[in-house]
Amino acid sequence: MQRILIQGRALYDGESYLTDAPAAVLIAGQRILALGRDAEAAAGPEARVLSFPGQTLMPGLIDCHNHLSLDPSLPDYLLRMNDPVPELTLRAVPLLEQDLLSGVTTSRCLGDKGFLDVHCRRAQNEGRLMGPRLQVATRGIRAPQGHGFVGYPFSGPEAIRMAVRENLAAGADLIKIYLTGTLRGPKGLPGTFAKAEVRVLVDEAHRAGVPVATHCVGGPGLDLALSCGIDVIEHGYFMTAEQIEALAASQAWLVLTPSIFFTDARLETLHGGLKAPHLAQRGEVGAVMARVAASGIRWAIGTDGMHGQLAAEVAHVVGFGAAPAAAIAGVTTRAAELCGLEQDLGRLAAGKLADIIGVDGDPLQDVTALQRVRTVIQ
């Protein structure tokens, strides 16, 4: 098996810089063999050398919330999720390549139509599709009256039980449920499912050893999620101080996805009158995100379909007050832990998968360096 020696200007392993040794990573096959001086010593004369002068080598990025066929660059993009599944699949293919070229080597998909995410995962695993390795939720489970443009409607405990089992049979890595909408409306933040329905869903998923994630921005839905043992809260835009404290005290994770409120271009492609309320509620959401950044909540970061723009989400989180190292952990070390992949991913270390990116600049001093990805090794 050929050994490959990767050389750069600096090496950030996901926790600290390698400062007393050369910025070098030795890989063989899919795994890292050694770093620094150990890498150069073990390379041997037959090793292939790939040199990237001026670049900081660091772990490949992990997008913790994505939808493969969601494309916010399209007008009325949420409504376009009603397009036929073949059209959605064709849309997903170039978006996956765009993600990989931006440095995202792993992506956690929170729902797509018609099990297209399962087929994309298989094609990527087999080398037939260029893109991040995928964790998939298959069909999102929403209430008939509830939010979820990427979901399917189910109602009642037994229908939900069957939906979870069908998703698991199709190959779901996680189960996704929509417990709230996205915006604060005239009635506040109403929930969409009864406790009995949520308990069935969590019980079915956990019996199979699969985590549960929920689209949930706050309100009674968040209280219900925590009381039922849901593993990951997605978004959390309108959490109260008490809910932030409860989430921090729980075992649950939070995935931050700022772009829907803080990326102007994305607001322009929303349908109907959705742009105005998103702008009106931007300040409130920003204040919540700032409290999250200062809390003890375990959080990671996702794009929610902003393909190729994970670095911009990281910059938003730094803008909320998170230290650059903490924000970068939200797409590397901590992201891998959220996904249950910390044994293989998230850090550069001997034995881990050789997912490596090279960026121009020092991302801990200037987090926008993540927007200047020059090299991707997966």
Image: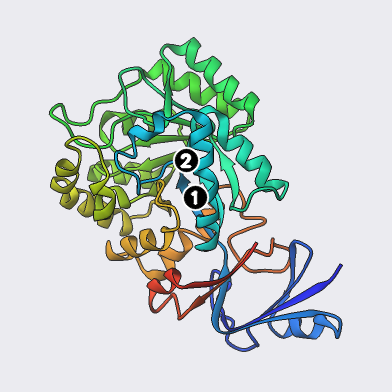
Mark 2 Cα shell of 10 Å, populated few (<14), some (14-19), many (≥20): many
Q: Is residue 360 left or right of residue 219?
A: right
The image shows residue 94 at horizontal and vertical percentages of 52, 50
Q: Residue at x 53, y 27 (%)?
A: 114
* Marks 2/1: CA–CA distance: 7 Å
> 304 and 34: which one is in front?
304
Q: Residue at x 40, y 40 (%)?
A: 233
Q: Is residue 171 above or below residue 346?
A: above
What x and y, as percent, mark residue 303?
A: 41, 51
- Give the percent coordinates (x, y) of residue 145: 30, 18
Which residue is at 51% across, 43% downward?
Answer: 92
Q: Above or below — where is 360 with respect to 176?
A: below
Proximity of marks 2 and 1: CB atoms separated by less than 8 Å: yes
Residue 137's disc is: none
Figure check: 25 above or below 123 = below
Left or right of 191? Residue 230 is right
- Side of 96 relative to 119 (left or right): left
- Can residue 173 be seen at all in this image of the molecule? no
Structural crowding at the residue carrying mark 1, measured as other residues with C-alpha within 10 Å and reported as few (<14), some (14–19) or many (≥20): many
Decide if residue 210 is in sight here: yes
Q: Nearer the viewer, residue 145 or 36?
A: 145
Tell me the residue that label 1 is attached to.
Answer: 95
Of the numbered discs 2 and 1, the one sitting upstream in the chain is 2
Residue 326: % across, % down: 42, 65
Amino acid type assigned to the residue bearing label 2 in the image: Ser
Q: Amino acid at mark 1?
A: Leu
Quadrant that contains the C terminus: bottom right
Q: Residue at x 59, y 53 (%)?
A: 131
Q: Which mark is residue 69?
A: 2
Q: Examine the image and state in which quarter residue 320 appears.
A: bottom left
